[in-house]
Structures are given as C-alpha cells and as structure tokens.
Image: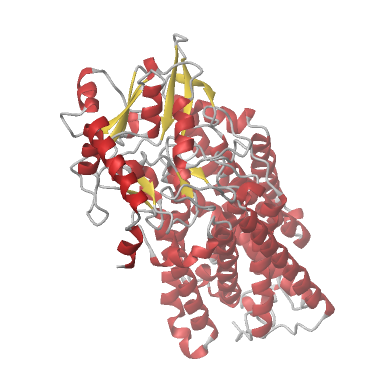
C-alpha cells in the first residue's frame, strides 16, 4: 500500500460555508428549543407523566448508539487487521466522538434540570445503569480521542492497535449499557429483557456504518477527492449484513414476547393496534429501515450505484429513528399492569389505558439540533485537522486491486 | 443567638396567648399533644430502622364517589391541578379494578408503595431517589436532575414530574419544576411526631377508615394488629419488592 497522505479540506468554498450555516442554524434552533422547554417546563412538550421520555430521547439514544457504531471502520483496521481500512480510521473515530457529543447534548438539554449537570458528574449511585453510562460515555470520548491522537501523530502510531482494541471493547460495553438502560426496567412489558443489550449492539453496527458511508461519500464528492469502489462496495455489503442482523434480533425479541401470554397485550398493541407506533414499526422500522435497504444494497446492479448506497444508508438512519420511536415512547404508551387478573376500569391518572403522545415542535427541533451539532463538529474538524486522506482511489487503498473488476 | 431572640415574644399578649394554648393542650387533648412532643424526631437525630412506616388499605371500605384521601393529600402537600391532568402531579389517586373472570369490581387508593427494594432508587443516577431507614421512599429535590428514569422504572406509575412553574407551595413540602416527586407518607408529619397521614385522616373523617397508617414493626400499633388478622397482599408481589403499602380486599 502506498503511503497515505492526509490533508485538511480547503473549506473556503461557498458550499462549505453554506453547509456550516445550515448546520449552525440547526444547532441554534435546537438550543432555542431547549431554552423554551427549560423556561416553560416540559408542559410545552408532548411528554407527560405517562410518556416521560419522548422525541429528544429518540434522537439522543439514536445518536449515542450510532456513535459507537461509527467506530466500526477503525475497529476493522486495528482489531481485525484489515489494513486497507486504515486510511478511513481517523474519520471513523471523529464521527464516533461527534455523534456521542451530539447525543449527549440532546440528553442533557432534555433534563428537567439541565443546570444540574454538575450534580450528575459529582453524585453517583453505582447501582444505576444510568450512572455507569455516564462513565461509559465520557470514557468512550476520552479513549477515542486518545485513539485519534495515536492515529494522527506518526510518533504515536505504534500504539494505535492496542488503543484500538481498548476502544473496540469499550464500545461494545457502552452499547450494552445503553441497551440495558431499557433492558433493566423490570416493570414494563416492552423492556425487562437482556435481549435489548445485544440488540442495541447490532443496531449500532448498522446505524454507525450508515452514518459513516453517507459522511464519507458526501465529503469526497464535495471536496472532489477520489473515492474508489473497492472499500465502498465492501462496506455497503457489511451494512447489509448489519441491517439483516438487526432485523433478526428484532424478530427474536417479538417472537419471545409473543410466546409469553402475559405479553400478548403489548405485542398486539405495538404490532397491530398501536396506531402510529404500529405504523412506524412496520413501515418505518421494518420496511423502509430494513427490507428496502437490504434489497437496494444486495441488488446486483442497483447495489453498485453510489446514489443507491446513499439512499439505502439514509433509509437505515430513518429506520433507526423509527426503531427508537417504537422502543422508547411506544414502550411507555402501553399501560403498566396494576393487579394481575384485573383490568382497570377507572383512574384519574391514566392507569390501564394507552397513553397518547404527540411530539411537539420544540422536541423535534432539539433532536434535530443534536444531529446538526454532530455534523457541524465533523465539518469543522475535517477543516482544521488532517482526518481525510487526499485520495481513496482503489489503487491507493488496495495494492492487489486489479482495475474495475473488484468484487462487491 | 439571633434565632432565639427572634422566637422570644416579650409582650404580655404573646405570653397570655401561649399560656392559654398550653393550658388547652393539657386539658383538652393531653394525650395527643404529649405523644406528639415525645415522638417528634429532633432534626439532628438520624432516622433509624427501628420503624417501618407504611399503610394498610382496606379496599372493601373504599367508598364509591369518595375522593377525600386525594383532596386531603393535595391540600396537605400543596398540589394544585392546572386542568391538564396528563401533566399534573398526583401523589395519590383512586383506581377502580374489575376482575377479568368474575366481573367483581373493587376500588382502592393507589400511591407510592414505599418498597423495601425500590426500583426507582436502584435506577436513579445521582442517588436523589432514596429510601430512608424507616422505609419512606423520597426524592432529594436538591440532587434530582429531572432525568425521569425513576418514572420509567416504577412499577406503580407512582411518580409525577413537575412540568411547569409552581405557586403557593407549602414551606414544609419542598417541590420544584423539573424534578420528580411522589407520595412522601406525609414525612413532614412523621418527623413532627404525627402518627397519621393526611389521606388516612381524611378517610377516617369521612367515616370509611379504608386507610390506616402506622409502624409495621410496632406490635402495639393498629396496623400491625390488622396485618396479623387480615389477609393482605402487595401490588405486583411478583416483583418481590416488599412494599410498605399493603392491600386487603383486592
């Protein structure tokens, strides 16, 4: 392999400044929404005492899960020894940190008391998986930052493999922790299962790969740097495998619930009667976020088109948001059981009835602001630091490459 | 020193008022006042596990159409409805249940069950949700960050999030926008030596006596006696949380 030359993007074009402007606007609107929610209280959101985690958590959890998955490519290079992916590893690490920061920002700004962030950093209940996650998130950011240093500083490059191992193991634990935030909730039919931890790990692989492919293709197209097909086609195949694995875990989750009589009510709700949640599950999560990307990615001719790979990646991201919408507000909308064998026929606190949840504009704006923040960080970082190789044409990444006959 | 000076009223009228009040306390209700004074816990003394405070709810006595416990709780703790029931705080509510097999209906008050192993305390990242040694589960409003994870975890949906600004709060019931709260078993009364909650008092006053408050560990208490005599159950006993609130007739 030829020596890879990394270079900052020029970042002086009108397009670049327009991109910064749009992303900056998303961040500003998100901050404004957070201020509005903080000032008036959560009464201005669609959330209630029934559905306590809404759209901000959908975006925050998606971003955090995608962050750990964005590290896939760096892990392929350092842990699995595929040196061809090494030139892509710095962007992979950058996306991981940026998406984590975007997700955490949304999570923190949706707190009832975001001003007490310092309390969350100084008071810990170590039985809480949420408290563990605070360490997992900050630790992940620190490890990946160190990993980036090892990768970008030639003097430190000898350490990048061991640090890459640590980052890989840490990201698996991190996503296990994120899934367990839900898996450890004993009382709700939608959660209370160890399966959510591995499910989230598998989902993270798909979401992170989709984000990586989109950002990679956009960066190289907009900077007019060469990007060959060899790695791209391998990565889109990998994305397809991750999407299929995600669908498998989702199927096992629902099959297990369908086997347990006590969970039939919940399954009937989320799969059939649940209105928007059932629709988002079948149309958003399964069809648009799963089956359609699979068909596109593995189609013998369509699957080689960059536009199609981009559309498939965008659909995987959309499906990821759909999955989180069904899992988080959908899981809460179904009522808790009060007394087994008895139905609730009267309550002033919405016991025994399906809770309604209509996301409000500020919630959506806050969530989208998180995505804007993550992408803004990436856009600025690639201008000030050497994250992107000058060329990723096939010959430079794969010495055994023989022209256009690369297998997909 | 200044505190002491502030509480001293040298005026003759003040002296007389207190003398009359003291005489009335001794002559009219000597038992209540003296017991209350004796049981009040000095603020510098730690709560111990010598007590386990709890409630016994007799659903068979819970009367249709009565909401005395709910009204009394709201009054005691300064909870006011805003007309937005989905976001208003409710520390206690009445729930009507129908047996799926027999159709038999029961009605009962429902609130924080003050578990020995509370899921809300397990999941709270900062330790704001905590269980006192005497069994009362509370939220420390100083370190609650409003993450609402406890509300996700509570099997009883007993907690409320304060969704908007509050007015007219009670000085001894701290609350705050952006924090989570729930039934405190009228902890302000317990610490002052009162041996009843607002809901239990109101239920008794309404003539039903469906709610009895007391010390589950005290063999001389009414609740101990009733728990020994009546068949009772915990709500969601399958979760093995050892709740401090027990139900009869459900």
Identity of the residue drawn at 25% across and 43% down: B134
Residue that protrudes farthest toward the right in the picture = A14
Q: From this viewpoint, is residue A398 visible?
A: yes
Hey, which quadrant is residue A187 in on the image? top left
Decide if residue B177 is on the left or right side of residue B59.
right
Q: Nearer the viewer, residue A261 or A215?
A: A261
- List x then y, in percent, for residue B145: 48, 57
Quadrant of the image containing the C terminus of chain B: top left
Q: From this viewpoint, is residue B215 visible?
A: no
Residue that protrudes farthest toward the left in the picture = B219
Q: Nearer the viewer, residue A288 or A185?
A: A185
Identity of the residue drawn at 68% across and 36% down: A276
Residue that protrudes farthest toward the front in the picture = B12
- Rendered view: A263 above or below A220: above
- Rendered view: A194 above or below B11: above
Identity of the residue drawn at 53% across and 71% down: A74
- List x then y, in percent, for residue B207: 38, 18
Image coloring type: secondary structure
Decide if residue A341 is on the left or right side of residue A284.
left
Q: Nearer the viewer, residue A234 or B17?
A: B17
Give the tally of numbered discs. Answer: 0
Quadrant of the image containing the N terminus of chain B: bottom left
- List x then y, in percent, for residue B236: 37, 29
- Rendered view: B62 above or below A311: above
Q: Nearer the viewer, residue B173 or A130?
A: B173
Hey, which quadrant is residue A231 in on the image? bottom right
- List x then y, in percent, for residue B181: 46, 46
Residue that protrudes farthest toward the bottom in the picture = A155
């Amino acid at each position: 392999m030829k020596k890879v030359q990394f270079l900052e993007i020029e970042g002086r074009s009108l397009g670049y400044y327009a991109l910064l402007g749009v992303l900056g606007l998303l961040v500003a609107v998100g901050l404004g929404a957070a201020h509005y929610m903080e000032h008036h209280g959560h009464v201005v959101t669609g959330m209630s005492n029934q559905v306590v985690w809404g759209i901000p958590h959908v975006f925050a959890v998606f971003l955090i899960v995608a962050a750990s998955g964005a590290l896939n490519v760096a892990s392929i290079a350092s842990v699995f020894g595929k040196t061809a992916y090494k030139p892509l590893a710095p962007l992979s690490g950058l996306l991981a940190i940026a998406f984590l920061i975007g997700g955490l920002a949304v999570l923190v700004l949706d707190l009832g008391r975001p001003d007490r962030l310092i309390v969350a950093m100084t008071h810990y209940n170590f039985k809480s998986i949420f408290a563990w996650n605070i360490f997992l998130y900050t630790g992940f950011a620190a490890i990946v930052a160190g990993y980036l240093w090892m990768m970008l500083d030639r003097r430190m490059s000898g350490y990048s493999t061991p640090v890459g191992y640590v980052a890989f193991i840490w990201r698996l634990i991190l996503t296990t922790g994120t899934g367990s935030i839900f898996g450890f909730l004993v009382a709700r039919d939608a959660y209370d299962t160890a399966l959510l931890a591995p499910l989230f790990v598998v989902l993270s692989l798909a979401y992170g790969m989709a984000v990586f492919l989109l950002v990679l293709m956009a960066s190289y197209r907009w900077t007019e740097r060469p990007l060959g097909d060899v790695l791209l086609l391998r990565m889109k195949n990998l994305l397809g495998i991750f999407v299929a694995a995600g669908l498998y875990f989702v199927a096992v989750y629902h099959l297990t619930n369908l086997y347990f009589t006590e969970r039939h009510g919940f399954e009937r709700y989320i799969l059939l009667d649940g209105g928007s949640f059932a629709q988002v599950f079948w149309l958003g999560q399964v069809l648009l976020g799963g089956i359609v990307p699979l068909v596109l990615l593995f189609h013998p001719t369509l699957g080689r088109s960059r536009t199609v790979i981009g559309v498939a990646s965008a659909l995987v991201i959309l499906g990821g948001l759909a999955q989180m919408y069904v899992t988080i507000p959908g899981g809460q909308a179904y009522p808790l059981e009060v007394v087994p064998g008895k139905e609730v026929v009267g309550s002033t606190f919405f016991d025994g009835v399906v809770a309604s949840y209509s996301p409000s504009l500020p919630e959506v704006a806050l969530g989208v602001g998180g995505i804007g923040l993550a992408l803004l960080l990436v856009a600025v970082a690639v201008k000030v630091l050497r994250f992107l190789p000058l060329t990723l044409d096939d010959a430079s990444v794969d010495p055994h490459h023989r022209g256009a006959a690369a297998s997909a | 020193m200044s505190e002491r000076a502030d509480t001293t009223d040298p005026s003759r009228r003040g002296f007389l008022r207190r003398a009359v009040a003291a005489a009335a306390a001794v002559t009219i209700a000597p038992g209540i006042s003296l017991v209350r004074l004796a049981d009040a816990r000095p603020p510098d003394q730690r709560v111990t596990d010598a007590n386990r405070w709890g409630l016994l709810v007799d659903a068979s006595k819970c009367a249709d159409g009565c909401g005395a416990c709910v009204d009394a709780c709201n009054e005691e703790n300064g909870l006011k409805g805003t007309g937005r029931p989905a976001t208003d705080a409710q520390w206690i509510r009445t729930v009507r249940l129908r047996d799926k097999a027999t159709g038999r209906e029961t009605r009962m008050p429902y609130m924080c069950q003050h578990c020995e192993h509370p899921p809300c305390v397990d999941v709270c990242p900062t330790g704001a949700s905590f269980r006192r040694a005497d069994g009362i589960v509370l939220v420390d409003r100083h370190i609650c960050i409003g993450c609402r994870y406890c509300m996700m975890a509570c099997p009883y949906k007993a907690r409320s999030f304060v969704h908007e600004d509050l007015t007219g709060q009670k000085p001894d019931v701290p609350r705050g926008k952006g924090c989570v709260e729930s039934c405190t078993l009228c902890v302000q009364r317990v610490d002052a030596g009162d041996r009843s909650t607002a809901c239990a008092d109101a239920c008794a006053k309404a003539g039903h006596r469906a709610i009895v408050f007391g010390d589950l560990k005290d063999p001389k208490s009414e609740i101990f006696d009733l728990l020994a005599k009546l068949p009772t159950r915990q709500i969601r006993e399958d979760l093995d949380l050892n709740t401090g609130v027990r139900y009869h007739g459900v």
